Image (spheres, rainbow, N blue to C red):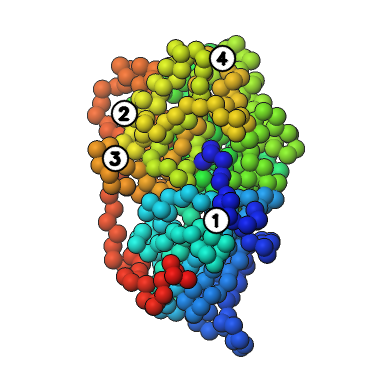
Amino acid sequence: MAERSQTAPEAGNDMGNEDAIGGNVSKYTVLPSGYCGQPKKGHLIFDACFESGNLGRVDQVSEFEYDLFIRPDTCNPRFRVWFNFTVENVKESQRVIFNIVNFSKTKSLYRDGMAPMVKSTSRPKWQRLPPKNVYYYRCPDHRKNYVMSFAFCFDREEDIYQFAYCYPYTYTRFQHYLDSLQKRNMDYFFREQLGQSVQQRQLDLLTITSPDNLREGAEQKVVFITGRVHPGETPSSFVCQGIIDFLISQHPIARVLREHLVFKIAPMLNPDGVYLGNYRCSLMGFDLNRHWLDPSPWAHPTLHGVKQLIIQMYNDPKTSLEFYIDIHAHSTMMNGFMYGNIFEDEERFQRQAIFPKLLCQNAEDFSYSSTSFNRDAVKAGTGRRFLGGLLDHTSYCYTLEVSFYSYIIGGTTAAVPYTEEAYMKLGRNVARTFLDYYRLNPLVERVAIPMPRLRMVVMPASQRFSLPSDLMLNQTPLER
Ligand SMILES: [Zn+2]
């Protein structure tokens, strides 16, 4: 999200707990206190030493109950939201309560029904736990910090279970995805390395456009899209992949868009943070979305690279940079929505509302009423604000936010949880909205190819987790 994170004033020091958490737990076996001897089945083994993993510490508090500590972002203990870890060596029908005890935020969609994700070796598709198994409350045992507790029942002894804050989307997955696109040798898709992160990971830049637009001297209308500046905001990657998949498709709208526009996409601005399992910061603890004013080539190299490119395009008389959209995920709001800038010029301000209004007509999960325009001082270093100030009156700069949890369809009150597919669909709808914006509709071939639609998948019984229907413990976590 683009908002500044809020820590509870009552949360004691800013670390969330007094014992510093160094790294992720690594195949950590929890033995009952006083137990010596070989670990037995049911002595849970926790692990987060894998890509995008995050779990800093485990304390067993009773036979069933475990306190889990998020590992703070590297070099920045203020941010503790993303978690992603595995549990193995379980016993069949073993019931547990996990308490995530050191969130750095107080407001959370957990209050509105959000639930953690789970999958297991034999059920590899991510599922959300049912909200009735999830509690979010202020806990006197943890300095009145907000704690999220969930009950779970392990049902298959051989399975390794994985729990996460939201659908993970790793750097490696992203690289494999781009590799697979490159192998298709499309003459309208180009991938280049715009720079490298501090840990030498790739900053990829994609160009999607008809080859005609890349001829020497051709004038270009550019739409620039970036994602994952905040590494824990994984929905950003699904939305971005939805945009890319649509733009490279054979859909008649995609063809027209490629003919008229040049799409420049840097889908992962913070590859180190993504790899490390951070929520908001880079390896060195910087919130990169506060450093657009003066990015350093050594401390913020990916941001520096993107900014240089944007300025270069801005100074090129043949290039018209028309849109800049930075994709985030929001931890307290529902739906997709946008943040835009405020301008003194009323007419410019009105024109800026056009794109989100059109997107709202195309995407049932996008809310124009949640879209807002501001010039808060705390957001001065964001991409949207900085570029909104730099670029001239013909450019529009937005932050596109999408909920970590759900959307509410107009006219109803029921929250529909986002799936990976629903995030990608929002991306497809963002892409096709440029057709409406540029009034290119008459150019689309009159063939009946519908937009790819959401498939409703009914989960077979073998893929379901057996979940505790009651909390089976004589004390609920609320009473601790
Ligand atoms: Zn963000």
User: How far apart are the two marked residues, 2 and 3, measured between alpha carbons?
Assistant: 12 Å
User: How far apart are the two marked residues, 4 and 2, measured between alpha carbons?
Assistant: 27 Å
Secondary element at tag 2:
helix
Determine if residue 144 is in view.
yes
First in sequence: mark 2 vs mark 3 = 2
Q: Look at discs 2 and 3 and give the one toward the viewer.
A: 3
Residue at the disc numbered 4: 392
Horizontal and vertical percent for residue 322?
A: 50, 19
Q: Look at discs 2 and 1 and give the one toward the viewer.
A: 1
Q: Residue 148's mark? A: none
User: How far apart are the two marked residues, 1 and 3, measured between alpha carbons?
Assistant: 29 Å
Q: Residue 409's mark? A: 3
Residue at the disc numbered 2: 361
Whether residue 287 sits left or right of residue 116 in the image: it is: right
Whether residue 201 sits left or right of residue 225 in the image: it is: right
Horizontal and vertical percent for residue 49?
A: 61, 62
Q: Are marks 4 and 2 in contact (CB under 8 Å)?
A: no
Residue at the disc numbered 1: 103
> Circle 4: is it few (<14), some (14-19), or many (20+) Cα within 10 Å?
few
Asked if the beta carbon under badge 4 is closer than 8 A to the nearest atom of ligand 1, the reply is no
Quadrant of res 440: top left
> Circle 3: is it few (<14), some (14-19), or many (20+) Cα within 10 Å?
some
**51 or 104, nearer to the observer:** 104
Residue at image position (50%, 63%) is 139
Q: Amino acid at mark 1?
A: Phe
